[in-house]
Each structure stands twice: as C-alpha cells, then as structure tokens.
Amino acid sequence: MKFLSGHLGYALGDDQLRRNVAGLARFLLFLTAVIVVYSVIFHIIMWRVEGEEHSWITGFYWTLTVMSTLGFGDITFQSDLGRLFSVLVLMSGIVLLMIVLPFAFIRYFYAPWLEARLRVRAPHAVSPDTSGHVVLAQWDDVARALAPRLGEAGVEFVVLEEDGPRATELVLDGVPAVRGKVDDVDTWTGLGVDRARLVVLNRDDLSSTNAALTIREVAPDVKIVALAEREHSVDILELGGCDRVLHLKAQLGEQLANRVNAGQNQAHRLGTYRDLHVAEFSTHGTPFMGRTLAESQLRAVAGVSVVGVWERGVLHPPRPDLPLGRKSLVVVVGSEMALQRLDEFLAIYDMNWNPVVVIGGGIVGRAAARALAARSIQVHMVEQDETVAGRAGELPARLVVGDAADRSVMDAVGIEEAPSIVLSTNHDATNIFLASYSRRLSPETHIVSRITHDRNMVAMHRAGADQIISYTSLAVESIMAVLHERPPVFLGLGARFHELACPDAIAGRTLSEAQVGARTGLTVIGVESPDGALEADPGADTVLPKGGRLLVIASDEQLARFAELES
C-alpha cells in the first residue's frame, strides 16, 4: 500500500497526468448526467404512458441495470415507446460503459500513470550542493532505524542501492537513494563522499572492504565506519581504509554480560560524555531493595545521582517515593570517583556465584562468555549445533550440545540454580520461546536476552525477559556516537542519551522554573553552555543558557513532548 501510494503521489505530480485526470473526471460527470436524464425519462414514460409510479431510486436502478446490460427483467415497459426507450438506453450504455469508459480510463489515467512510473529512475548522483550528509551503503534494518535519528539531528542522508528497480522503489517511498555499484569510483563520486560527513558501510565484510578501498580513491579524508560481521574482518577493514570498525556482535555479547546479575555486585558502565559517567546497578541483595529512592540516599552514599530506574523494560523517571524492587536496575550519573565509591559499597553485597547459563554458542554467546570470564564468573553454555559448539573452546566451564527446549539439557547446565540466563541465539522467535520456557523452569532467575528487531521487545518482556539488548539499537547508538565524535552511551531499549539544543522558549530560566522534567518526563543529566562548559548533574537552580545544549535521557515519547517546547 505504501509503495502504491508513493507511485500515485509521484504520478499525480505530473502536469500532463493531472490534465488527463481532469478530462476523465469530465467524462464521468457527463456519464452521471446521462444516467440522471434517463432516470427522469423513465419516470415520465412510466407515469404518463404505462400508468405506474416508481421511486427515484427505482429509476436509477433500472437505468443502471439496462445500461450495464444486466437486465434483470423485474421492471419492464409494456408500450412500444417504452421499449424503444429501453433500446436507446441499452445501446448508449454499451457505448458509454463498455467502450468509452474503459478506453478513457486506460488512455487518460492508467497509461500515463504507467509511463510516469517507467520514467522514474533513481538518480546516479546527489545534488552538487549536497554536503555534510551521511552515506549509507544499503537500506537494511540498521539504516531504517538510523534514518529517524539522523533526522532528529538535522543530518541529511543518502542510500546506495545497486539494484535499479529496488532503487526506484526507495525513491518512490521517499527514501533518498542513488543507483550505482559499490566498487565503482563514479558511484561514490556521485554520492558526494568527498563532501560527506560520514560513510556507513553496513554491507557484508567483503563488499565493505571493496567499498572502503574505492572510497579512498575519491575521498581520502572522509570518515568511514564499517559494521563487521566477523572478528577476523576487523583488521582487514581497517587496513582497507575504515576509520572505525564496529564488531557489533561482540559488543552485543559484552552488553549482555554487563546486564548479568551474578558474582560481585558492581555498577556497570553504560557510557561516558566528557566527565559525565552513566552506569546502572542491580538492587538485588543490597540494602536499597525494598526502599524508596529517597530512603536509599544514594547521593550521600556515593555522590551519584539517580536518573531513572528500570522495571521490566520501562525506565521510570526518578521520584523520591519510587520503590526499588528485587529486580530494579538503577541508572545513575556521576564522576568516575563517585562510581568507584558506589562499587566499593556494592562489593560487600555479593550476588549468586553459581554459573551463568548462556544459551547459544555463536559470536554473541562466546563474547558474553569471555566478558563473564573476565569477571571471574563461570559459564555453562548450551549450543544445539555441534559445529558452532566446537568453536567455543574452553570458554564455558561446561558445554552441553543439545536443544535448550529439552529439560534434561537445561538440568545439565544447572538452570534452577543459575543467577542469570543469557539468551544469545540469532532468532527473535527462538529467544522469545526460550525466555518463556526458562522463566517457567526458574521463576527467580534474571533473564537477559538479545533481539534483532526492536518490534519484538514487548513480546520478549511478556515472555519473561528482565532485560533486552537490541542489535539494531546498539548499531544505531554506536554510529550516532561516531557521527558526534563521542563515546557511545547505550542505555537499552526504550530510552536514549540525547544532546538537545536548549529551546529559546525556556532559555534564561532555571530548571525548576522551566519544569522540563515535569512537562516532558525526560531527565536532564547535564547542561552545556555555548562556550563548551559542562555542568554535570544540574540542580533545580541551574540556569538554562541560550544557545546551549541539554544532555538528557529520554524515550521517544518524551522527546516528542520536548519538541513541543520549541514551538
């Protein structure tokens, strides 16, 4: 439907086609007038000659059935005059409805629309004055999720598409696409890479390496970020000319491991912006469990500020009366020294030291196992494919080859005693099933899962997962961090770190007067003045500078409400 609407929108933008549609509309009005006249004559003959009375609806009904040659025969004339009129209506109906109308539709609408569609071709180059844009090597899930983020940042983008018809579909759907080959110098010249702000190579490793080498012939200085599928490709892509290579599956495994509740409790670092550090920790087994935020006195304990509390996939804004449950994850900001003090406080409250169960021995699962091993946490792994299991080596303390849906397999890895379960398979449906199954086997276990498509987040939480890390969201946040030349801050699905321009409508007011949090729900964690000075963890009396920036943590909904402040 979206593709069809794109074609129609483009076609109706053609002046000649609009004139043709107007001509078709005039014929339809003439046809309507003929039907009305015939209906009036039907009434006159029926009343004056036949001596019968019928409703106006009956008149229209008779006219249309005769003109369309259906002729049900339920209403007929008995007089010669009436029958001659019936023949006239029938013959004109054959001409107007069976011949002229189809011809007019094809001639004045369908054929021009089809010709307009065939004339549409994705361009081979961007406009010469295009600059500061982002070039995406293909239109995939990562590009689809990245596009709105670029729009929020006010950055234009263009997509390279090798297939001509597919490029045309993208253009008609409103996606700025350019046709060309990934290994053609002219293609990258046409994409204006020498004027681009960033090139994102989100193709397979072989194509990305070829593209990087080709781009460097055109633009030696443009920043290139590549998404590597395999660990061994990282060095090759860097040698090919990429400035940053993101091995996202390995990063995804590390992010999953950071969310595990096991071993020694500590605050897991989520990201850094200059001197502002963002971290989260679990309340499980700590004195904070069962208290409200006000009662926890985290600022007095470690000098950190709470910016939100995760509860089953929902980031709640900090309120003094917000209760901290057994599985609450508290998001805090502060200096590195403050986070170290928090770690020292949490260290005395050990969590369950039993082995963590990792289901899936692929790249993500192995990366999670390595990250857990670095924290001296044992891992028991389940992998169904013997070939994949053979690559795990000595990473897990125990490796069971089998189906995780088999109860005996889960018993063999100690599912009931495991403090956490990591679901790292490559299929969202499988992870949803395993989350539901694992939750039934071990109701109190902390379940952390990966997903590929963000749309499956609700289903995953419903199945029983406590925390979810999205491959797509991780990719988008990592790319945006490269674009803005800052370290990535990955909070998880449902909330993001943003750098927002301070709206003129609230500039000059204090945070308390502007009521940004109360009106939007987002949390301001830093205020940056136009000269670059950063005030971390601003108080209620912090003045919002005109031309400055606000560092916030917000969901998409909260961000939309903030945008209303600017209007």
Image (spheres, rainbow, N blue to C red):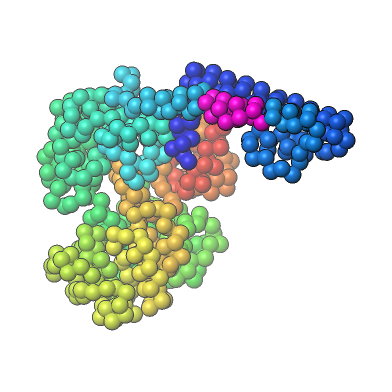
In this rendering, the answer to whether 453 lies above or below 291 is above
Image quadrant containing the C terminus = top right
Horizontal placement of 358 versus 309: left or right? left
Image mark count: 0
Q: Which residues are magenta?
A: 89-104
Q: Which one is in front, 350 or 129?
A: 129
Residue 204, image quadrant: top left
Horizontal placement of 475 versus 332: left or right? left
Residue 49 lies, in percent from the top left, at 86, 31
Q: Which one is in front, 343 or 423?
A: 423
Q: Residue at x 23, y 27 (%)?
A: 187
- In the rendered image, residue 121 lying in the magenta stretch gets the answer no
In this rendering, the answer to whether 449 lies above or below 241 is below
Horizontal placement of 145 versus 2: left or right? left
Horizontal placement of 492 versus 89: left or right? left
Residue 184 lies, in percent from the top left, at 18, 29
- In the rendered image, residue 103 lying in the magenta stretch gets the answer yes
In this rendering, the answer to whether 120 lies above or below 238 is above
Residue 547 lies, in percent from the top left, at 46, 29
Residue 357, image quadrant: bottom left
Residue 466, image quadrant: bottom left
What is the magenta segment's predominant secondary structure? helix
Residue 77 lies, in percent from the top left, at 78, 36
Residue 357 visible (yes or no): yes
Q: Which one is in front, 274 or 47?
A: 47
Q: Residue at x 80, y 36 (%)?
A: 78
Q: Residue at x 64, y 40 (%)?
A: 70
